[in-house]
Image (spheres, rainbow, N blue to C red):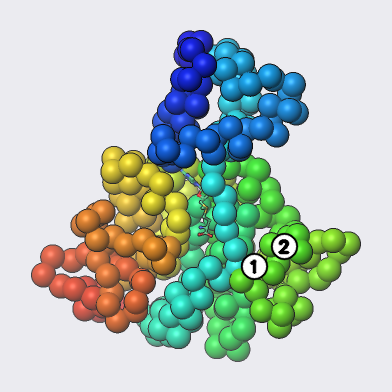
């Protein structure tokens, strides 16, 4: 239950709600972002200011508006092949290793946690497609999840503006994997079919997604406080095969954040489950063990 507060506290209350529900922290020095992010919503619902919004949100019947407000405050920044070097490592190092290790069962499962508008998951799908002859006969499953229903819907649609399509995609990929539709660019249905998007809060337990060979959780945990980060890392650890690989954002690292994962060293920017006394890829169980 939220109580009406004096003017200066509205942003603090909204930041508190965001952190409680999603884990995402906004530093007081960046509270100005809250006003900017919520301005369109205030206009849409003819709510005069943030104080009035907080008052409206104090009514439990307005839960849908609270959801909408929180989604508006989330940072959904994403683009195709963000951190190209990491995607190159995935293709040249991680894929061959997993192809060898999974040669018998010929299945590979990839999870993008915090997949935003879908660029990351579709980048992975395009990566597989560019070497599809090597993956012939394999079942490749890519799942993208995000707490925000609006970005999950956008990801499913696979429709991008001219601005979005130009971010991270080469002209070659753009023409090969997208079709122009008016002002927008729409993902190739074959690539779209490789990816499934679902709404999920990384901080909540889950039952049915199973374990993955590669987990990407990029530019999500950096906005969490230590306690929520620990909850998220525990879920990532449970969701990863024992010899699976974790990929964080280029500016992120597990160092000082968790002892559940360690750097692979051999594959820069990729992490594996930590095994006491063993580091790097030697921490991975033997293939077919
Ligand atoms: C900055 S975007 C990063 C998108 C993509 N991973 C990338 O690196 O380009 C962070 C995403 O994490 C999502 N997110 C934030 N908190 C979350 C949570 N508790 N559970 C699931 N997703 C969350 C946000 O909605 C947002 O779409």
In front here: 2 or 146? Answer: 2
Quadrant, the C terminus:
bottom left
Q: Which residue is mark 2?
A: 163
Q: Is residue 211 above or below residue 29?
A: below
Could you say which quadrant of the image residue 97 lies in?
bottom left
Q: Identify which residue, 4 or 154, lies in the foreground.
A: 4
Q: Nearer the viewer, residue 228 or 285?
A: 228
Q: Quadrant of residue 253?
A: bottom left
Q: Are marks 1 and 2 in contact (CB under 8 Å)?
A: yes
The structure residue drawn at horizontal position 65% and vertical position 43%, both measured from the top left corner, is 150
Q: Nearer the viewer, residue 246 or 269?
A: 269
Q: Residue at x 58, y 26 (%)?
A: 66
In the rendered image, the vertical position of residue 223 relative to residue 103, given as above or below = above
| Left or right: 225 as drawn, with respect to 179 | left
Q: Is residue 185 left or right of residue 278?
A: right
Residue 240 in picture, x, y percent from top left? 36, 61
Rendering coords of residue 204 (x, y %): 42, 39
Q: Secondary structure at mark 2?
A: helix
Picture coordinates of residue 185 (x, y %)? 78, 65
**Separation of disc 1 and disc 2 at Cα?**
7 Å
Q: Work out whether residue 121 can be spotted.
A: no
The residue drawn where x is 36% and y is 61% is 252
Q: Quarter-wise, where is residue 120 in the image? A: bottom right
In the picture as drawn, the residue positioned furthest to the right comes out as 182
Residue that badge 1 annotates: 167
In this rendering, is residue 155 above or below 275?
above
How many residues crowd around disc 1 within 10 Å: few (fewer than 14), some, or many (20 or more)? some
Q: Which residue is rendered at x = 64% and y = 25% of the image?
A: 65
Q: Is residue 164 above or below residue 204?
A: below
Classify mark 1: helix, strand or loop. Answer: loop
């Amino acid at each position: 239950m939220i109580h009406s507060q004096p003017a200066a506290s509205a942003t603090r209350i909204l930041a508190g709600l965001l952190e409680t529900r999603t884990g995402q922290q906004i530093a007081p020095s960046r509270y100005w972002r809250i006003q900017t992010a919520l301005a369109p919503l205030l206009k849409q619902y003819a709510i005069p200011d943030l104080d009035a919004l907080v008052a409206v949100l104090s009514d439990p019947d307005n839960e849908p508006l609270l959801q909408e407000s929180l989604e508006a405050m989330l940072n959904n920044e994403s683009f195709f092949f963000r951190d190209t070097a990491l995607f190159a490592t995935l293709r040249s190092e991680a894929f061959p290793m997993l192809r060898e290790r999974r040669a018998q069962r010929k299945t590979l499962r990839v999870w993008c946690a915090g997949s935003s508008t879908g660029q990351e998951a579709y980048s992975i799908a395009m990566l597989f497609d560019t070497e599809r002859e090597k993956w012939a006969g394999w079942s490749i499953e890519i799942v993208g999840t995000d707490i925000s229903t609006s970005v999950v819907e956008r990801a499913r649609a696979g429709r991008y503006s001219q601005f979005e399509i130009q971010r991270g995609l080469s002209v070659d990929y753009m023409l090969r994997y997208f079709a122009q539709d008016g002002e927008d660019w729409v993902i190739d249905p074959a690539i779209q079919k490789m990816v499934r998007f679902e709404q999920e809060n990384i901080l909540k337990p889950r039952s049915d997604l199973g374990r993955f060979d590669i987990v990407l959780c990029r530019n999500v945990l950096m906005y969490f406080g230590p306690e929520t980060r620990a909850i998220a890392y525990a879920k990532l650890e449970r969701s990863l095969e024992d010899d699976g690989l974790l990929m964080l954002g280029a500016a992120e690292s597990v160092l000082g954040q968790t002892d559940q994962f360690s750097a692979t060293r051999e594959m820069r920017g990729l992490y594996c489950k930590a095994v006491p006394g063993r580091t790097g890829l030697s921490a991975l169980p033997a293939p077919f063990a």
